[in-house]
């Protein structure tokens, strides 16, 4: 028997928008900005024209979907769950793993978002939402360092930026090694540096 497209029942406009966004996000991960309204409509179980009853254009739907997909709330909640009384190294390692996992999961989508929201079709509202998300993530990392701020040679703010910078470079940069990231290794790098005690004292290796 010929399969028929599943159709969802009538919804209020806000519910319809949310359903279309939810259907679009997996397609963005799969097809990027090349996703078509036909594919979205099929995934949502609606007629293609339904999209334009609640969105002005495909671009508006895609922008809303990208912003929703990059919502940092799950990562923020996981960071907030890190025990502030745990050893600093453990907290930093756990935070680094969470942030790096987020960057890896959304690397392609983040690249697509930059092309869409900042380059081809600048969208100030979406840009502001993404900037707010980045700031929320930064502040969540600051809170990881804050209980031990007095022990740091830099501010908790600066330490958080260094952690984010390294995670971002590993996920997006040309020198990242897939599958080799270690939160514990990054914690050691940030907290101890890469000099041994002997080198730090100025001792020279003997021949």
Image (cartoon, helix red, strand yellow):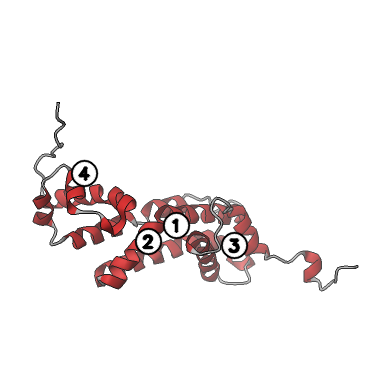
Measured in 3D between alpha carbons, the distance from the residue under mark 2 to the one under mark 3, in whole angstroms, is 32 Å
- Secondary element at image label 1: helix
Return the residue at label 3.
148
Q: Name the quarter where the C terminus is drawn.
A: bottom right
Front-most of residues 180 and 68 = 180
Residue 43: assigned label:
4
Rate crowding at label 1 as few (under 14), some (14 to 19) or many (20 or more) other CA atoms within 10 Å. many
Residue 110: assigned label:
2
Front-most of residues 23 and 129 = 23
* Left or right: 5 in relation to 151: left
Residue 103: assigned label:
1
Measured in 3D between alpha carbons, the distance from the residue under mark 3 to the one under mark 4, in whole angstroms, is 48 Å
Rate crowding at label 4 as few (under 14), some (14 to 19) or many (20 or more) other CA atoms within 10 Å. some
Q: Position of residue 96 (x, y in %)?
A: 53, 56
Q: Name the quarter where the N terminus is drawn.
A: top left
Q: Nearer the viewer, mark 1 or mark 4?
A: 4
- Secondary element at image label 3: helix
Front-most of residues 29 and 203 = 29
- Secondary element at image label 4: helix
Badge 1 vs badge 2, beta-carbon distance below 8 Å: yes
């Amino acid at each position: 028997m010929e399969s028929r497209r599943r159709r969802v029942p009538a919804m209020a406009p806000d519910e319809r928008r949310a359903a279309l966004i939810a259907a679009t996000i997996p397609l963005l991960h799969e097809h990027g900005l090349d996703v078509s309204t036909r594919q979205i409509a099929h995934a949502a179980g609606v007629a293609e024209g339904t999209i334009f009853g609640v969105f002005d254009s495909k671009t508006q739907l895609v922008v809303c979907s990208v912003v929703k997909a990059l919502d940092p709330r799950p990562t923020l909640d996981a960071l907030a769950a890190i025990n502030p009384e745990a050893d600093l190294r453990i907290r930093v390692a756990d935070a680094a793993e969470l942030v790096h996992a987020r960057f890896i999961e959304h690397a392609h989508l983040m690249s697509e978002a930059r092309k869409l929201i900042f380059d081809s079709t600048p969208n100030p509202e979406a840009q502001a939402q993404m900037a707010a998300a980045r700031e929320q993530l930064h502040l969540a990392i600051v809170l990881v360092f804050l209980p031990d701020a007095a022990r740091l040679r830099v501010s908790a703010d600066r330490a958080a930026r260094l952690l984010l910078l390294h995670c971002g470079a590993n996920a997006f940069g040309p020198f990242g090694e897939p599958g080799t990231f270690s939160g514990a290794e990054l914690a050691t790098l940030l907290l101890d540096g890469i000099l041994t005690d002997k080198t730090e004292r100025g001792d020279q290796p003997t021949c």
